[in-house]
Amino acid sequence: MTFTTPVEDRYFEDYIPGTVHEFGSITVEEAEIISFAQRFDPQPFHTDPVAARKSVFGGLIASGWHTASLTMRLLVDHYISHVASLGSPGLDELRWLKPVRPGDTLSVRVTLLETQRSSSKPDQGFIRGLTEVLNQHGEVVMTMKSGGFVRCRETDASTAMIGNHV
Amino acid sequence: MTFTTPVEDRYFEDYIPGTVHEFGSITVEEAEIISFAQRFDPQPFHTDPVAARKSVFGGLIASGWHTASLTMRLLVDHYISHVASLGSPGLDELRWLKPVRPGDTLSVRVTLLETQRSSSKPDQGFIRGLTEVLNQHGEVVMTMKSGGFVRCRETDASTAMIGNHV
């Protein structure tokens, strides 16, 4: 299923509950696995191919935070509105289900679980989705439920400026 | 409260439910906010100081994934065992509560919620904690509940090699 509007012109009204969207392709490079982990998650199974071979994972795997960050890149490129996104309050049930290894190619499937127009801030709504991250074999390597605030296309101009939030 | 064992020699038995641990200090640099976001979360309020000023956030803020990754660095440096960690299956209730801005200094408070020795894998257990991330004003900017598998110090040698998992 595809959106009827491009990500550069997508508003709250364009996110339809129950729709499923598949998109993106990003390859996980060994050099980036190591450099990401050296800065953010310096555990040997993320930073040292030799030590990783002797670990429970049997070889180098990406930090779960690296996988999540690559997923975010695909979401920003293809799913999250470039003009109406107002940020996210957080996420639930993030699961790292399978190792992500050098050379893997990841893509994303988002199922839109619910959308709710704000009653207090009539210029925006909240959308919530299940994100599944797949590798090149079609295996789900990560899932999470997350949501975000999105500006509405149809906005009452008199209230549009008071909808700010953190 | 402090651990009785250093992070280089910490096993499942050293994680005591109910204990609270505060540690770490990491400063969030504007250049890294921008470079992280250019790769992983290229939304204008993370990548462009001028555009960010006109956004709902009133200025540049770190990607939530950047904040989470910096948090992971503090956890690896001070909390997660360097010898007994077997990875994490995921996390729950991650919340980005306040913006993280250039120059902020983050620290971490972990409350150990529960620990459970595995019945099927006698060489390991599972620990679960609430992580709160604080800025230099003592404000909680992020929280999450997460867990991980940890090898036990006291292990039955005959079973120690069959405890591998993903």
Image (cartoon, coloured by chain):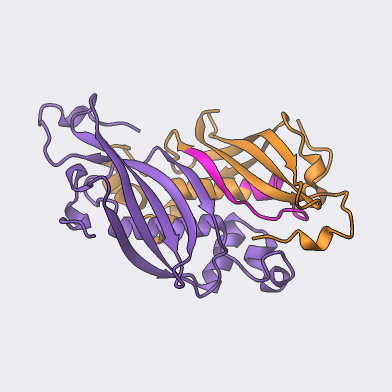
Chain colours: A orange, B purple
Residue B91 lies, in percent from the top left, at 44, 42
Residue A20 lies, in percent from the top left, at 70, 30
Q: Identify the image quadrant of the N terminus of chain B.
A: bottom left
Residue occupying the point 75% across, 51% down = A120
Q: Is residue B69 above or below residue B50?
A: above
On the picture, is B151 further left or further right than B107? left
Q: Is residue B82 above or below residue A130?
A: below
On the picture, is B18 further left or further right than A8? left
Residue occupying the point 64% across, 66% down = B47
Residue B75 lies, in percent from the top left, at 34, 56
Asked if residue B15 lies in the magenta stretch, the reply is no
Segment colored magenta: A74-94
Which quadrant of the structure image shows residue B165?
top left
Residue A121 lies, in percent from the top left, at 77, 53
Q: In the rendered image, is residue B87 in sight?
A: no
Q: Is residue A79 above or below residue B106?
A: above
Residue occupying the point 68% across, 34% down = A112
Residue occupying the point 80% across, 47% down = A10
Asked if residue A82 lies in the magenta stretch, the reply is yes
- Of A112 and B36, the residue lying toward us: A112
On the picture, is B91 further left or further right than B81? right
Q: In the rendered image, is residue B115 in sight?
A: yes
